[in-house]
């Protein structure tokens, strides 16, 4: 098999990234947007040993599960991978991804519940984050193409609500009228780098990420925002560094309260521009209620990577006491406000710092502990896993948006993986660690994409 060769193949399965997997001449081909059972002519783009990557040239036999994507730039934008697949098949795919990740990466064989569906298949996201760039003499607003920093221009995004289309048009109009340039990553020029919008039950926090502290014509942008959002705050975030990180350290409030409060499941909470809030409200509610079911009234809960304190407060209302550990100061301050607003003075305690630094003291002081781990995509720190293995924690409730790092952490906690002296992980084929799996439950927080949120409960043997 050679580069640029054209072949006719039949797709056998979907890979973990949502791409089609076919086999030909002893080589495994990965073909984006090809579905199981489909026959297609493909062009080979890259060959490496017995693995090759190809693209569809002509779809010869479509699958029954194929549907027409709603997005005009699907397959060019890197945001969605599954819009061409019926939703029930997406759920089945995600259940399989979690099961296979546990088996292949973690060495764990476990029953995985069917993926919990989202009420909304589209328009579900409460957060919009768009890079703003420059292409020749024109500004571009859109999403990055897959595995690149090339911006694919968009006018609308179907997985975001209707307000996103109006916001994109308003930003483009503002930039054109006021002579503002998008950011050129190579040259380091341009005033606007990103726009980030978060919706909190009809209230909006808009953040313009800029390279300068004063934006020409900002009053005109406020005028345009007034036409879109009934209640909103506008921040400028100053980021002058050559970095892939979206936000800089300095936030300047231009208009509005800056943070907004909401109520969910009897808990009043607030969030600001940096506070982590799950992007799909419907699925978040289901996920949190299920997580709560694993703790009893007499338990003490330690919520690690706690964000703005919503889940911590839910545990505090149900259980004896709940501690929240969060490294982002803004989010930790929001968690303190949640405690005050809900009258949880004796039942909820928040600390700001690294989990690995603050967790040991809490574990040494408390008994009948349930630990909740909801880490970033990279998973829990290895030192946190070691600490839990050496502790007497009765239950560990894990929430993860990455099946691969989840599988690694579950493998270590169940003994299916072991860490060598050099830090490498090896499969043991055993399960002699102190924790056993109670349940594994995927939740479709991100319809139309390859991503899936997973809830795992581990219990001390």
Image (tube, grey):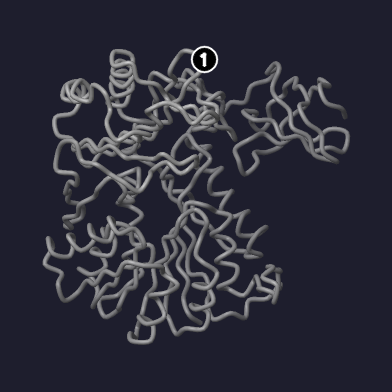
110 up-or-down from 346: above or below: above
| Residue in view at x 24 percent, y 74 percent | 319
Q: Which quarter of the picture shows residue 369?
A: bottom left
**Where's residue 47, x and y in %?**
81, 34
| Residue in view at x 36 percent, y 62 percent | 327
256 up-or-down from 454: above or below: above
Number of numbered discs visible in the structure rendering: 1
| Image quarter of the N terminus | top right
| Residue in view at x 35 percent, y 30 percent | 160
Count neighbours of disc 1 (C-alpha within 10 A) and say few if under 14, some if 14 to 19, many if 20 or more: few
**Residue 124 in view:** no
Q: Which quarter of the picture shows residue 281?
A: top left
**Where's residue 333, x and y in %?**
23, 60
**Residue 275 in view:** yes
**Where's residue 413, x and y in %?**
55, 73
| 428, 249: nearer the viewer | 249
Q: Which residue has dot 1 on it?
A: 136
**Where's residue 389, x and y in %?**
53, 79
Q: Which quarter of the picture shows residue 288?
A: bottom left
């Amino acid at each position: 098999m050679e580069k640029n060769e054209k072949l006719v193949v039949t797709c056998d399965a979907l890979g973990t990234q949502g791409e089609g997997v076919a086999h030909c001449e002893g080589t495994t081909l990965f073909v984006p947007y090809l579905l199981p059972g489909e026959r297609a002519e493909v062009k080979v783009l890259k060959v490496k040993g017995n693995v090759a990557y190809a693209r569809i040239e002509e779809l010869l036999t479509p699958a029954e599960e194929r549907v027409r994507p709603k997005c005009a730039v699907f397959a060019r934008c890197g945001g969605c991978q599954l819009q061409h697949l019926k939703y029930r098949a997406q759920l089945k795919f995600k259940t399989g991804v979690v099961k296979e990740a546990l088996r292949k990466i973690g060495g764990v064989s476990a029953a995985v519940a069917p993926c919990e569906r989202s009420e909304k298949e589209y328009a579900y996201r409460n957060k919009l984050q768009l890079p703003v760039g420059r292409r020749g003499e024109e500004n571009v607003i859109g999403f990055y193409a897959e595995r690149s920093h090339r911006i694919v221009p968009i006018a609308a995004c179907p997985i975001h609500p209707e307000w996103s289309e109006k916001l994109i048009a308003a930003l483009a109009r503002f930039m054109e009228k006021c002579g503002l340039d998008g950011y050129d990553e190579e040259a380091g020029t341009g005033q606007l780098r990103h726009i980030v919008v978060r919706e909190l039950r009809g209230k909006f926090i808009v953040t313009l990420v800029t390279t300068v502290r004063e934006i020409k014509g900002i009053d005109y942008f406020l005028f345009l925002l007034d036409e879109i959002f009934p209640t909103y705050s506008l921040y400028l975030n100053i980021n002058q560094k050559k970095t892939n990180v979206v936000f800089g350290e300095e936030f300047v409030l231009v208009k509005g309260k800056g943070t907004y409060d909401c109520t969910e499941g009897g808990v009043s909470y607030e969030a600001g521009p940096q506070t982590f809030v799950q992007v799909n409200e419907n699925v978040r509610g289901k996920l949190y209620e299920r997580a709560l079911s694993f703790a009893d009234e007499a338990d003490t809960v330690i919520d690690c990577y706690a964000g703005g304190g919503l889940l911590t407060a839910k545990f505090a209302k149900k259980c004896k006491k709940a501690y929240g550990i969060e490294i982002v100061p803004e989010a930790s301050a929001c968690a303190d406000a949640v405690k005050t607003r809900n009258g949880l003075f004796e039942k909820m305690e928040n600390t700001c710092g690294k989990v690995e630094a603050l967790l040991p003291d809490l574990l040494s002081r408390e008994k009948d502990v349930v630990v909740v781990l909801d880490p970033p995509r990279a998973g829990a720190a290895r030192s946190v896993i070691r600490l839990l293995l050496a502790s007497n924690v009765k239950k560990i409730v894990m929430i993860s948006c990455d099946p691969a790092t989840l599988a690694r952490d579950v493998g270590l906690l169940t003994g299916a993986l072991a860490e060598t002296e050099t830090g490498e992980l090896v499969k043991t084929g055993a399960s002699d660690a102190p924790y056993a799996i109670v349940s594994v439950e995927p939740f479709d927080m991100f319809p139309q994409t390859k991503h899936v949120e997973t809830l795992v409960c581990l219990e001390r043997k």
